[in-house]
Image: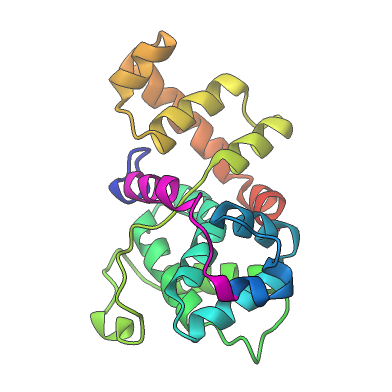
C-alpha cells in the first residue's frame, strides 16, 4: 500500500464533506445517539461506547440505512490502514472490500458483544485466506446496497495516539498527515517541510512500518 493510495485520498475527501452532516432524525430516538448533532459526534460515540453504538448502527444498516454502515466503516478504517501496511501480500483495497462486506453481513444476533474485535478479526481472517491479491467476487456483493465506496477515513486519532505513545514524533506525524490526509505528492509535502521527495518517502515508509508493528495497540486506543 502506498501512502497516496487512491482509495484513501477519495475516502478522506468524502469524510471531510460528511463529518458535519446532520444524522437522520430517527437516529436521535436511539438513546446512545440522542445527543449527536453531526456525524462526527456519532463517530465519537463509537469510540466511547463501542458495543452499544456499533450494535445500533449495524441494526440501522440492516434496516436499509446505508449511512449507518458508512459510519461503522469510518470507525474501522484506521485498523485496516494499519493492517494493510503490515501485510506484504494483500493491499488496502482487499481490506476495504472485506470490511464493507463484514459490516453488511455481521451476525448481530449471534455475536452482540465485542463487536469491534470480532469484526476486525473477521476481516483479517478473510483477507489472509486469499493466497494472493485477487478482486472480490462480484457475486458476493449482491446483498450490498448500491453505494459509492468513497466514504470516510480519519487518521488524526491514530497519529495523535502514536505520538502520545512515542511511537513516532510530531514531525513524522505531520508528514503522514500531509501525504495520507491531504493526498500531497512527496515533492509537494517535502516543499512544505523543507525535505526532498526522497526523504519524505523514506520517512513516511519508516513511520508507517513503525505504526504497523503496533497496529493492535493503536486500534484499541483509537477505536475502542
- Prevalent SS, magenta region: helix
Q: Residue at x 50, y 79 (%)?
A: 61
Q: Residue at x 46, y 47 (%)?
A: 85
Q: Residue at x 67, y 70 (%)?
A: 53
Q: Residue 44's image quarter? A: bottom right
63 magenta-colored = no
12 magenta-colored = yes
Q: Percent from the top left, x then y, of residue 131?
A: 35, 70
Between residues 216 and 164, which one lies in front from this camera angle? 164
Q: Which residue, as the protein is rendered here, is positioned at the far top?
A: 194
Q: Which residue, as the protein is rendered here, is positioned at the far front?
A: 25
Q: Residue at x 69, y 83 (%)?
A: 112
Q: Is residue 118 visible?
A: no
Q: Is residue 18 visible?
A: yes
Q: Percent from the top left, x then y, of residue 40?
A: 57, 52
Q: How many marks?
A: 0
Q: Is residue 27 left or right of residue 184?
A: right
Q: Which region shows up in magenta?
A: 9-26
Q: Residue 96's image quarter? A: bottom left
Q: Percent from the top left, x then y, of residue 39?
A: 55, 57
Q: Residue 4's image quarter? A: top left
Between residues 49 and 128, which one lies in front from this camera angle? 49
Q: Percent from the top left, x then y, of residue 13?
A: 36, 45
Q: Is residue 101 left or right of residue 40?
A: left
Location of the C terminus (image quadrant): bottom right
Whether 186 is drawn above or below 112: the answer is above
Q: Is residue 21 left or right of residue 55?
A: left
Q: Is residue 189 left or right of residue 27?
A: left
Whether 49 is drawn above or below 191: the answer is below
Amino acid at each position: 500500500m502506498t501512502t497516496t493510495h487512491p482509495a484513501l485520498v477519495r475516502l478522506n475527501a468524502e469524510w471531510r464533506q460528511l463529518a458535519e452532516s446532520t444524522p437522520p432524525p430517527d437516529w436521535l430516538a436511539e438513546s446512545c445517539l440522542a445527543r449527536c448533532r453531526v456525524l462526527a459526534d456519532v463517530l465519537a460515540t463509537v469510540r466511547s461506547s463501542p458495543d452499544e453504538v456499533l450494535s445500533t448502527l449495524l441494526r440501522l444498516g440492516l434496516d436499509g440505512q446505508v449511512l449507518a454502515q458508512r459510519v461503522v466503516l469510518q470507525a474501522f478504517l484506521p485498523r485496516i490502514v494499519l493492517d494493510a501496511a503490515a501485510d506484504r501480500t494483500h493491499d488496502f483495497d482487499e481490506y476495504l472490500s472485506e470490511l464493507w462486506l463484514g459490516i453488511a453481513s455481521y451476525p448481530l444476533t449471534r455475536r452482540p458483544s465485542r463487536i469491534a474485535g470480532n469484526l476486525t478479526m473477521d476481516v483479517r481472517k478473510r483477507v489472509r485466506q486469499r493466497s494472493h491479491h485477487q478482486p472480490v467476487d462480484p457475486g458476493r456483493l449482491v446483498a450490498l446496497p448500491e453505494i459509492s465506496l468513497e466514504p470516510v477515513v480519519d487518521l488524526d486519532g491514530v497519529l495523535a495516539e502514536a505520538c502520545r505513545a512515542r511511537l513516532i514524533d510530531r514531525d513524522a506525524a505531520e508528514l503522514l498527515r500531509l501525504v495520507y490526509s491531504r493526498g500531497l505528492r512527496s515533492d509537494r509535502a517535502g516543499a512544505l517541510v523543507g525535505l526532498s521527495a526522497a526523504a519524505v518517502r523514506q520517512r513516511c515508509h519508516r513511520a508507517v512500518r513503525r505504526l504497523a508493528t503496533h497496529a493492535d495497540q493503536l486500534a484499541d486506543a483509537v477505536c475502542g
